[in-house]
Amino acid sequence: MWSAAILAGGRARRLGGRDKAALRIGSASILDRQLALLRPLIGRILIVADDETPFAGSGVPVVPDLKPGAGALGGLYTAITAAATPRTLVLACDLPFLTFAFLARLMEAGADADVALPRTVDGYQPLCATYSDRAGAAFGAHLEAGVRKITDAIFGLPSLVVRELDAAALRPYDPHGTLFFNVNTPADFARAIDLGAEQDGGH
């Protein structure tokens, strides 16, 4: 059984504290774009955020960080723990160009692994990956030990089964090279708007 979790707890300092999930790319917010992909795939979806107010109209339950101040690894641990299902698909809230086909492939890769982890030419993408409940328990132990880097937690327990999707495996799902484009700065947001217009226009 699967759940999906959208991590929306970051402070977005480089965006002046703006709510990344609410940023509009084309005709929809990033959150709405992600929910439109997730709903046909997974029946249980949650959002990890300390303030539920911005998500009141989403129809999705919001859960606060179980370990405040623990960064992205804390959010990931919260997502897996709150999901309470054998496997969880986790997405950062600032990825506007994910696709249904890719997420379905990612879930397929994670069906018999503790972690299904994309690896692009830029490195690992742990905030668009799948995790087992066993991985969640391991992350909790790592957090207690002071670990904060997600990849250290993933590879810090050799018994976890990690399935990587390398650049060659990702290429068929990323014709525009934007699958993992994330919005961190005003320049990123401007670029995302342009990319969204190009893709929506069929270019």
Image (tube, rainbow, N blue to C red):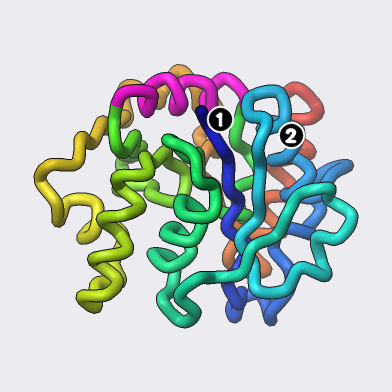
Query: Relative to residue 30, is residue 175 depicted above or below?
Result: above
Quickly name the residue at label 1: 176
Disc 2 on helix, strand or loop?
helix
Chief SS of the magenta region: helix
| Identity of the residue furthest to the front in this view | 84
Q: Is residue 96 left or right of residue 86?
A: right
Q: Which residues are magenta?
A: 100-112
Tell which of 36 and 56 is nearer to you.
56
Q: How many marks?
A: 2
Whichever of labels 2 and 1 marks the residue nearer the N terminus, that label is 1
The image quadrant where one finds the C terminus is top right
Q: Is residue 192 left or right of residue 68?
A: right
Dot 2, crowdedness within 10 Å: few (<14), some or many (≥20)?
few
Picture residue at 83% right of the left edge, 48% below the top: 59
What number is the disc on residue 188?
none
The amino acid type, in three-letter code, at marker 2 is Glu
Q: Position of residue 67 (x, y in %)?
A: 45, 75
Q: Is residue 148 left or right of residue 64?
A: left
Q: Position of residue 150 (x, y in %)?
A: 31, 60
Distance, label 2 to label 1, CA atoms, is 10 Å
Picture residue at 72% right of the left edge, 74% below the top: 51
Q: Is residue 108 highlighted in magenta? A: yes
Query: Relative to residue 168, is residue 130 depicted above or below?
Result: below
The amino acid type, in three-letter code, at marker 1 is His
Tell which of 169 and 114 is nearer to you.
114
Tell which of 77 and 123 is nearer to you.
77
Quickly name the residue at label 2: 198
Given contact means CB atoms under 8 Å apart, are the residues at marks 2 and 1 in contact? yes
Disc 1 on helix, strand or loop?
loop
Q: Position of residue 6 (x, y in %)?
A: 61, 51
